[in-house]
C-alpha cells in the first residue's frame, strides 16, 4: 500500500500531518510504515505535539545551529545562487532525518502519547512538499 501526502508550508517551521497519516492507515493490519520527504531542503521528525513551544524552540535552535547564508559566519558557503536560506536548508536536511519508519498495530501507528509526525520546512518561502508513504503489512 502506497500513497503520497502533500503538505503546503507557509515558510520555515514544523507542520504536523499525523492525522492525515492515521486516516490513511485506518483499517490496515500490523506492519511498518515508511515515510520519506521528496525534497532536499526539508526533513521529517517525530516530536512532541502537546506544547507548541517545542516547535518554536526547535526552529530557533536550528536557526542558531545553521544560520542563514547572509550571516557573516556563513561567508564560507559557495552554493548561494538560490538565496540565503537555500544552502542552510540543505545543511539542516543533511543532519535531520528525511525518512521515518513507524511500527503499526491494528492499523494504528505505535507513536507515544505526545508524539506527532512533522514536516520540518527549512526554506523561508511557502512550498508544496511531498512525502512518499509505504505501508508493509506483516
Image: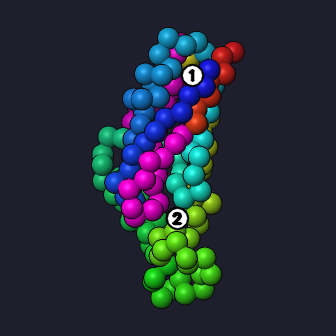
Residue 76 visible from this viewpoint:
yes
- Element marked by disc 2: helix
Q: Is residue 58 magenta?
A: no
**Residue shown at the point (61%, 15%) measured from the top left:** 30
Q: Quadrant of residue 64?
A: bottom left
Residue 96 position in % (x across, y down): 58, 55
Figure disc tally: 2
**Residue shown at the point (60%, 41%) measured from the top left:** 36
**In the rendered image, which residue does mark 2 sit on?**
89
Residue 108 visible from this viewpoint:
no
Q: Residues within 10 Å of mark 2 (few under 14, many from 20)?
A: many
Q: Nearer the viewer, residue 30 or 35?
A: 35
**Residue shown at the point (43%, 42%) measured from the top left:** 7
Judged left or right of residue 100, residue 58 is: left
**Residue shown at the point (38%, 56%) measured from the top left:** 126
Q: Quadrant of residue 101?
A: top right
In the figure, 121 relative to 66: above or below? above
- Element marked by disc 1: strand
Q: Quadrant of the C terminus?
A: top right
Q: Nearer the viewer, residue 126 or 27?
A: 126
**Inter-mark Cα distance, 2 to 1:** 31 Å
Question: Which comes before the other along the chain, label 2 or label 1?
Answer: 2
Q: Which mark is residue 104?
A: 1
Q: Quadrant of the N terminus?
A: top right
Q: Which residues are magenta?
A: 106-131
Residue 119 position in % (x across, y down): 46, 46
Residue 3 position in % (x across, y down): 56, 28
Q: Is residue 107 magenta?
A: yes
Amino acid at each position: 500500500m502506497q500513497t503520497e501526502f502533500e503538505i503546503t508550508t507557509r515558510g520555515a517551521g514544523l507542520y504536523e500531518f499525523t492525522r492525515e497519516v492515521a486516516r490513511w492507515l485506518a483499517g490496515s493490519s500490523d506492519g511498518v510504515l515508511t515515510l520519506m520527504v521528496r525534497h532536499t531542503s526539508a526533513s521529517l521528525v517525530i516530536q512532541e505535539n502537546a506544547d507548541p513551544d517545542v516547535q518554536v524552540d526547535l526552529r530557533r535552535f536550528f536557526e542558531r545551529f545553521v544560520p542563514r547564508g547572509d550571516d557573516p559566519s556563513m561567508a564560507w558557503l559557495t552554493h548561494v545562487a538560490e538565496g540565503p536560506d537555500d544552502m542552510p536548508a540543505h545543511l539542516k536536511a543533511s543532519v535531520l532525518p528525511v525518512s521515518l519508519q513507524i511500527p503499526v498495530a491494528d492499523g494504528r501507528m505505535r507513536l507515544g502519547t505526545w508524539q506527532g509526525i512533522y514536516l520540518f520546512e527549512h526554506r523561508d518561502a511557502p512550498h508544496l512538499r511531498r512525502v512518499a508513504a509505504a505501508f508493509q503489512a506483516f
